[in-house]
Image (cartoon, rainbow, N blue to C red):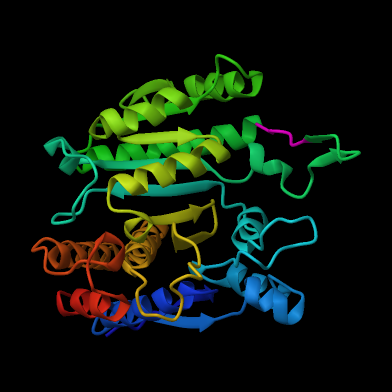
Amino acid sequence: MTTTPPLRICVLPGDGIGVEVIEATVPLLEKLAHGAPFAFAFSRHPAGALHFRATGDALPQATLDAAREADAILFGAMGWPEIRYHDGTEIAPQLDLRIALELYAGVRPARAIPGLRLPLADPRAREIDLVVVRESTEGLFASRGRGVIDDDREARDTMVITRRGSERVHDFAFRLAQRRKARGRPGRVTCVDKANVFRSMAFFRKIFDERARAFPDIEARHNYIDATALDLIRKPWEFDVLVTENMFGDILSDETAALVGGMGMAPSADVGDRHGLFQPCHGSAPDIAGQGKANPTATILSAAMMLDWLAERGHGDALAQAAQRLERAVDAVFAPGQIVPYELGGRDGTRAISAAIASNL
């Protein structure tokens, strides 16, 4: 039994199936903590589109304060298609949190889980194990809320690439590749850009090459965004870590999710130097909300990423071991092919998947 203070986990269920997948995940973390040398203190806080509709506030100050003070943030999903700001954009507190907490590295792993039917017939698709690292605080998203429309005639959004933002995300990608290399992965980082056309992208690549010299043990490559989109279909097993501008990473991480079973199988983290937020890549899915069909696997794997991150932050190796247990339990559930989520043609919903994973812990 632990004698250390419990780790404070700020839980933001959000909207739609976000609530359902969080409810499927927290009990697994509680089970992992039972008898372990660590403990969790979960606190739930409101935010999201439905909260905005009810109160006029998508991200209350009290919620932001709780996120800032927590050891980690576990996030469900936020947004609702017909609930929008006056400028027509969707409610997205997750983007506000990235800026407020400087969560500059969007970490989007894609790993082929044994037993799942994959869209690529090539047997090498079973070897897919890559990570898209998306710069999450600038790029084209720097124009969010700042775009200009002139006389209903012309619209402009400006891409922003800074040296500080680029250096820290490139360093993050190289350090991640080092950790993965220690576990048997190739140790390779590919800079994805459009440096042949845009000065901003040439600047992004220039800084990548500068930072690569500090990591001589890691292979540094370049690939244009259009070629990368093609190669992720032709030969995704050749990629290890990809580092990208914000918008490019947003698009490519959806593509890599599709390669391993879809958004329900795609975890993610938004990480900065002090804070970490962990969430599934999918949205709130209003079309299936409340039906028990949501696949919680992406959220459960995001929780495993949270445990790993907490271990790296110095909270104990037992958390890293718990992360491995959770990942192995997920693999054990899908490997026999008996559990199949709805979106992959099966009949197993939120409770069935979570219960099966719990039984394998």
Q: Can residue 239 be seen in this view?
A: no
Residue 202 makes an appearance in the image: yes
Which residues, given as a range, are shown in magenta? 156-161
Left or right: where does residue 187 sit relative to residue 333? right
- The x, y position of residue 299, in whole percent, is 38, 66
Q: Residue furthest right?
A: 151
Q: Compared to 14, does 118 lie above or below?
A: above
**Residue 210 placed where, x, y %?**
51, 20
Residue 158 is one of the magenta-drawn residues = yes
Magenta stretch contains residue 229: no
Q: In this view, does 147 lie to the left or right of 200?
A: right
The picture quadrant where one finds residue 34 is: bottom left
Point 25% across, 37% down: residue: 181
Q: Residue at x 23, y 73 (%)?
A: 347
Q: Nearer the viewer, residue 302 or 335?
A: 335
Image quarter hosting the C terminus? bottom left
